Image (cartoon, rainbow, N blue to C red):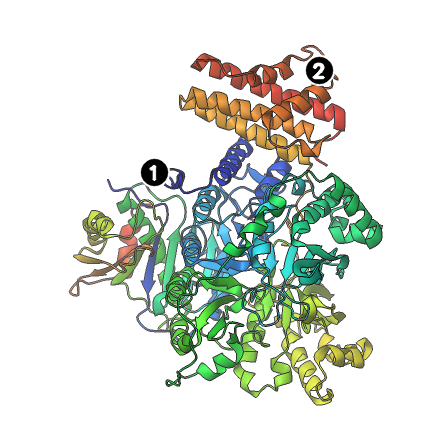
Amino acid sequence: MTSWKEILQDKIPAEMGNLIDIYEAQMELRKQGKLDEKVFAEARLRKGVYGQRYDNGQRHDGVRTRGLDYPSDEVVKGPDTLWDAPGMQRIKIPYGGMSAEQLEVLSELADEYSDGIMHITTRQDIQLHYVHIDDTPDLMRRLAAAGITTQEACGNSVRNITACTLAGVCHDEVFDVSPYADAMTYFLLSHDDVQDFGRKFKVAFSGCAGHACGLVKMHDLGLLAQTREIDGRTVRGFTVYVGGGLGTVPHQAKVLAEFCTEEELLPLTQAVARVFARLGEKKNRNRARIKFLVAKLGIDEFRREVEEELKIVPPDPRHDAYIDNLGAFEYQPAKAGMALNGAPLPEGFAEWYATNVYHQAQPGYSAITLHTPLGDFTAKQGFALADIARQYVGDNIRLSVEQNIVLRWVADADLPAIYRDLCAIGLGDAGADTIVDITACPGTDTCKLGIASSRGLTAELRTRLIEKINLLPDAVRELKIKVSGCFNSCGQHHVADIGFFGNSRRSGNHKMPHFQVVLGGQWQQNAGSYGLAVGAVPAKNVPAALEALTERYVAERGADENFQSWVKTLGRKEIKAMLKPFMQLPKFEENPGYFSDWGDSRVYTIDDIGVGECAGEVVSLFSMEISRAESTHFEALLALDDGDFAMADETAYKAMLLAARALVRTKYLDVGDDANNIVSEFRSRFYDTELVYDRFAKGKFARYLFKRHGGAPSRVDEDYAHQIIDETQLFIENIHTAEQRINGVIVS
Amino acid sequence: MTESPRRLGLKLSMQRPPRIQPGDIVPVFQRWIQQHSVEGMLIDVIDYKHVPEGPGIILIADEADYAYDLGDGELGLHYVRKRGLPADLRGAIRLVFRRALAAALLLEEEAPGDIVFDYRRLKLNFLDRILYRNDAAAFEAVQAEVAASLAEVFGAPVTVQRLSEDPRQLFALGCAVSDDAKVRPAALLAKLEGDS
């Protein structure tokens, strides 16, 4: 039977294809029990393959916790994570930019491997849920053939790099940050210096200081566009922020550099990554984000470390090569810009126009927001939207951090027509960027960490608010609501006017779903300030509490006073007093409805909460890299089985190099990929010093590498291929033993 | 023998829109999990009713999904077999028909007289773009076998048509039994259950 690997082999970039093949081999090794489950879990996460709720094989059905008897119940894809349990595939969409063709491929995959739904995340990714791990290699190949990667979409590495949705078309931006976000994405992707973090690392670009879009102040690394006059010419660069983040303990980022030029951008980022890898916490993952390192060292000491590191960052032609290509980053509108021409407007157009249309800096063009409720849209909508994009805007599609889709470069004259077409596929709802446009993380629907139903609450609030949106005062319509299912802030509740995050409280012998209310966060000014937690309200009381809050805001606010200011003036104590009536907990017997979450008829429980994979296990760099050597060795075995002896030899040699490199990099990170360098460093550091010497065999295993590095035999037959594969196995074992002896434990 | 697709879905539509709201199906499916009312290793319920013409409410199982489906403007029960299909297309069609039919009959019991399925027609979705590209050749290759497989179940002739010519869309077939055929869903189910 034909496979996607065969069909797409000419369309997948070699390096991407290789990484997917390695991952597929790691899957096979894990199934055979030959790859440590923690190591595989981190390798899987770095391919964007994430666990989902109930993947530990149990679920509370509302009456009792029941076992879920997955077919391969002996095989796990990570600690306490069963192989056959459905999972989530996160797909990186750098700065949210995609083409019509890419949208079609994503739609195909949602159809065939998921539940027909694409979910837009708050990092401009796409997530597919209920995906079986066995389908993920083909899914990745089909993405790779369309120029999309899942590499490092999860795990302790650099996540999807985000940027303003309006970058390139915004009136207020200093310059378009999209090509910089693009360059950094591919520079850091699989880079050696981002493989040894204790936690994930999030980067964002913003084109201006005032608006929210880029949210640079809540990122591990934030880049804010600036220009300076230097020697009479205008030089582009960035203010560099570091150490921001939400999570349980939100931190505002600190300024690392007031201005770094575009030439300095990538080396500086690399230096930050190296400092984080070297000094960041590795054991306690709750303190392992870079914000804790910056707080521990202080920004001045952190800056000094980065400056010192910068001096030893190896030269790399890619550091400034991208600058020559910036000009190639041009937008191709589908049509010439043209003003609205006075033709009759469709029903509902005016309302949609008021909330969903942004007039671009380029006259005659607009960027329009397609409001996708809860960030979800169907494969069918995806195909139809690709047609609409081709007709009106070309490949100018972006995903937003507010879980919407933005089409840029719509000729103004086409606005009525595109509105009609969007309505026909259910994507013409008004209300983008208003109180009904609520952001929500997956919560208890699919997340292992979810405590309360963020999506259930969001759906309920949205339904109620849409019913009365036309009656709401402007001051309320403009508010932002964001909901997280737990304290980990994936729904970004800290930077909303009104944020909620899930928790639970006890009433009698029962648990009740609650939401902590967080007020007065600032979305503008790049997430300028964080909100104030004022108390937890039972989930079922949240709509009423919201109504009371907004009514009082409208009644008491001063002229032009915004929500943040009103909250600050009113104070936590007074707000808590206002919410107190909504915090009362009924007894189960009095009102059992309170003991079920929104959109869920089961009696509430927190028994389903599992161990999150968001943080990932902290697995050593060596463990990750030696596992690649092992999976490459496995590929050599497959080549041998196929009778391709030359390929078996070549692949086995590659596996030995990878193993040697893994050991070298425990002492010398910058060894690079050159085979001569790897062998030379391995020889001088580990062979000549006898560190890899076996007690009995002495340096025999290392010499297998030296021999093969000296050249392949003129004729590779089956016997030789068998021999080198056996030698590779022994060499890898030798490297494992040496590493344990030299460095202690493998998996921390 | 015609090879079955990797995944196969079968949708039975309702005769008319019911009064019951999609959200009301969430507790129904959650109860089905508690009581193990339908076949399969039942895992969870997911609510997509907010998505226009989407999959609605899905009862997720290990090897299949049961959706109270809102797609194509027609409410219905969509059974999607994800794993463990028989290798031959005929066997695969009979399996998905049996499971969909059993679930549809059960769903009718939840809202008697309100939820009423049209058992005379069904839609087959081939979720496999390698084996079943949406083109005329695929239709030519399977039309007769699909018609024969279903005619065997219905005991009457069945017409089969391709639902979309858009090559990007899934290969999907609309199937309808002849107007003069008597269709008794319980009898159909009994006949299909003979397979198990």
Left or right of A703 in this view: B32:
left
The one of A502 and A508 positioned closer to us in this rendering: A502
Q: Quadrant of residue A95?
A: bottom right
Report the amino acid beneath label 1.
Answer: Thr
Quarter of the image with the N terminus of chain A in it? top left
- Residue A529 picture location, percent across and down: 74, 68
Mark 2 or mark 1: name the one nearer the start of the chain. 1
**Residue A235 at x, y percent in the picture:** 66, 59
Residue A417 lies, in percent from the top left, at 38, 76
Q: Which mark is residue A2?
A: 1
Q: Quadrant of residue A619?
A: top right
* Residue shown at the point (82%, 48%) measured from the top left: A304
Element on which disc 2 rests: loop
Q: Determine the chain carrying the residue at label 1.
A: A
Q: Is residue A212 visible in this depiction of the protein?
A: yes
Q: Which residue is mark 2?
A: A693
Q: Residue at x 54, y 74 (%)?
A: A432
Label 1 SS: loop
